């Protein structure tokens, strides 16, 4: 057995009493970009670090070819890493339960591999973790969020689940569902587009802090049921538009819609599009230096000041 | 019966003998995790679920491996060639490669020394591969969980779930029947199933990769080698496919299934000459 093979290595990092296990994708020929920024992928929800269809493996392989070292790690209790997952894992994630582990991991990797910073890449629930973790460490150079959500999912009674299934199969059900969403839309208009009651407010605050601190952020959105491009279906709150409306002048947020794929981005179209968007975004954020744009190092110093003002440690 | 309860985060103990690595096979490397034991009573090769099914069964499968190692049963789990952490392109693989993986790893595990029996343990499609390897004379004990009759049966179940997920996001005429998906494969085209590109050849070959006859004997042995086949129902989600696989399945209690099978493994190992250091 080998722990290192061509292009990747099986590595582990001790965080507290636990060993986190992951994969380190090395840059071919050892020629990392001058800026020396790496990417860290972790579990999308409860699935392994390779992600559905091993799409994360694909992204890491391609991004290393562009000169960015990549890491993929399992969080405690999820996959090969030590530990047990908490019982109410979704609640745990939505409260930022894994954030301290991810920030410690980022710090450890930056130190071990002498990196300038790490971009945290999170999908779905992993995006929630990335957002909560980013302000906790100055070594986080940016975040990539694929299909993030900003609400707290509520447990639904069996009756509602059955009703939803029925509405997706029956014509009458579809009409009833459409009516329900129109009523919800009216309620949103009356409520002047304020976040709904089940919004994850600490997460929204986290986004605002990162955005106003000028942290580079890329959001990739997949098509959702009855949605129209970036906009959600009628009756659902448009969190991304709301967050953009609150963005200050320093924000470095890019939001892109990926057409013809699904939530996992694991199909050919999805994985290609995600790769292209991340590549272009990395190039724009960390390689090109137009006049007036701060360098990554001075940006990190400025962000540190901003975080410490809002999140004193 | 062995008494066992679900572990809490506080109960978890780091096993210094748990090692991840890459095992060379022709044209690729298999990602393996050895759950070592200083004085094993048996060695187990864990042949897990296939491709996208691996994602859902991953957590309980690892817990099972750790539990075995805790009871002096050394085990090795791995990702199929072209899947997960292993290298190689999935669409370039055939069942010949995946059978070769089982054979090579079983031989490696056997070569680790000590006169302890080797158990081959497969889940779903992994059970078919395990059964075929055992039938070829490799291994001392065989344990099958949720074995399908053939690889095609396993693929078909995965495909049906993919179609139902596809259809959940479509309306009326946009929905395609099962036959149109299978038709694509039969016409020689590839099909994207949860991010894996199934090839027409994999589909065709899957019909001939069958669980060998004669593994289900009255006395539970084949040529004196213990064999056990366990049917798993929907209650065993996410270890096997179920109607829904979600966060609620992450910490599912499999203590009964694990206890019964651990007890059987230890007893089978004793019958094959393994010295059982575990007492209960």
Image (cartoon, rainbow, N blue to C red):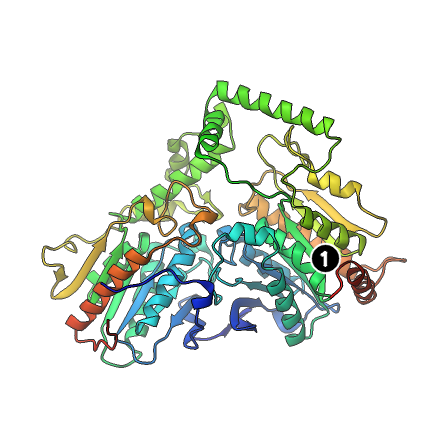
Is A139 above or below relative to B56? below
**Hey, which residue is sitting farthest left in the picture?**
B218
Q: Quadrant of residue B279 in the image?
A: bottom left
Q: Position of residue A249 (x, y in %)?
A: 86, 49
Which quadrant, please, contains the N terminus of chain B?
bottom left
- Left or right: residue A188 compared with residue A105: right
- Left or right: residue B124 compared with residue A117: left
Image point 59% across, 56% down: which residue? A59
Q: Secondary structure at mark 1?
A: helix
B131, B219: nearer the viewer: B219
Q: Position of residue B275 (x, y in %)?
A: 21, 78
Q: Circle 1 marks a residue in which chain? A: A
All told, the count of numbered labels is 1
A106, B48: nearer the viewer: A106
Q: Position of residue A254 (x, y in %)?
A: 74, 48
Q: Which residue is mark 1?
A: A282
Image point 79% across, 43% down: which residue? A246
Which quadrant, please, contains the C terminus of chain B?
bottom left
How crowded pointer 1 is (Cα within 10 Å; few <14, some 14-19, many 20+) is rated as many
B26, A253: nearer the viewer: A253
- Left or right: residue A110 compared with residue B104: right
Q: Is residue B19 visible in the rendered structure shown here?
A: yes
Q: Is residue B187 visible in the rendered structure shown here?
A: no
Image point 80% across, 61% down: which residue? A303
Q: Position of residue A166 (x, y in %)?
A: 45, 26
Image point 19% across, 66% down: which residue? B137
Is A115 above or below relative to A258? below
Q: Quadrant of residue A239 in the image?
A: top right
B164, B132: nearer the viewer: B164
- Left or right: residue B25 compared with residue B262: right
């Amino acid at each position: 057995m080998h722990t290192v093979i061509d292009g990747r290595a099986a590595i582990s990092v001790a965080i507290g009493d636990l060993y986190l296990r992951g994969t380190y994708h090395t840059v071919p020929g050892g020629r990392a970009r001058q800026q020396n920024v790496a990417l860290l992928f972790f579990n999308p929800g409860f699935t392994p670090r390779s992600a559905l269809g091993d799409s994360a493996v694909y992204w890491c392989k391609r991004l290393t070819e562009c000169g960015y070292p990549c890491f993929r790690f399992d969080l405690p209790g999820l996959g090969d890493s030590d530990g047990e997952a908490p019982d109410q894992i979704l609640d745990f994630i939505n409260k930022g339960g894994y954030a301290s582990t991810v920030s410690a991991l980022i710090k450890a990797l930056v130190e071990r591999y002498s990196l300038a910073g790490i971009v945290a890449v999170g999908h779905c629930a992993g995006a929630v973790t990335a957002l909560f973790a980013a302000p906790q460490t100055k070594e986080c150079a940016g975040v990539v969020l694929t299909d993030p959500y900003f609400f707290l999912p509520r447990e639904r009674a069996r009756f509602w689940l059955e009703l939803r299934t029925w509405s997706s199969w029956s014509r009458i059900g579809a009409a009833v569902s459409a009516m329900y969403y129109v009523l919800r839309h009216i309620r949103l208009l009356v409520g002047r587009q304020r976040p709904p009651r089940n919004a994850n407010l600490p997460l929204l605050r986290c986004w605002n802090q990162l955005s106003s601190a000028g942290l580079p952020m890329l959001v990739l959105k997949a098509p959702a049921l009855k949605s129209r491009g970036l906009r959600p279906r009628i009756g659902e709150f448009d969190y991304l538009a709301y967050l953009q409306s609150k963005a200050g002048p320093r924000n470095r947020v890019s939001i892109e819609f990926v057409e013809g794929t699904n939530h996992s981005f694991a199909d050919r179209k999805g994985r290609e599009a995600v790769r292209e968007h991340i590549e272009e975004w990395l190039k724009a954020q960390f390689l090109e230096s137009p006049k007036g744009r701060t360098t990554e190092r001075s940006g990190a110093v400025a962000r540190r000041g901003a975080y410490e003002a809002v999140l004193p440690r | 019966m062995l008494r066992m309860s679900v572990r809490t985060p506080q109960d978890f103990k780091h096993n210094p003998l748990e090692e991840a690595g890459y095992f060379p096979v022709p044209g690729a490397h298999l990602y393996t995790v050895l759950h070592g034991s200083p004085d094993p009573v048996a060695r187990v090769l864990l042949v897990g679920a296939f491709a996208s099914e691996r994602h859902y069964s991953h957590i309980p499968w690892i817990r099972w491996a750790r539990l075995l190692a805790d009871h002096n049963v050394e085990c090795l789990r791995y990702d199929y060639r072209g899947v997960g952490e292993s290298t190689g392109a999935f669409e370039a693989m055939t069942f010949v490669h995946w059978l070769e993986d089982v054979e090579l790893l079983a031989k490696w595990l056997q070569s680790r020394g000590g006169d302890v029996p080797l158990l081959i343990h497969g889940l779903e499609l992994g059970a078919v591969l395990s059964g075929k390897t055992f039938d070829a004379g490799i291994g001392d004990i065989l344990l099958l969980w949720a074995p399908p009759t053939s690889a095609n049966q396993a693929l078909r179940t995965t495909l049906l779930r993919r179609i139902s997920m596809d259809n959940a996001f479509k309306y009326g005429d946009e929905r395609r029947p099962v036959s149109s998906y299978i038709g694509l494969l039969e016409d020689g085209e590839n099909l994207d199933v949860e991010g894996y590109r199934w090839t027409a050849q994999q589909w065709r070959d899957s019909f001939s990769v069958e669980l060998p006859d004669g593994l289900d004997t009255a006395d539970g042995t084949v040529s004196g080698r213990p064999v056990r086949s366990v049917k798993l129902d929907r209650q065993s989600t996410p270890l096997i496919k179920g109607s829904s696989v979600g966060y609620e399945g992450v910490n599912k209690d499999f203590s009964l299934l694990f206890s019964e099978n651990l007890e059987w493994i230890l007893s089978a190992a004793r019958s094959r000459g393994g010295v059982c250091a575990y007492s209960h």
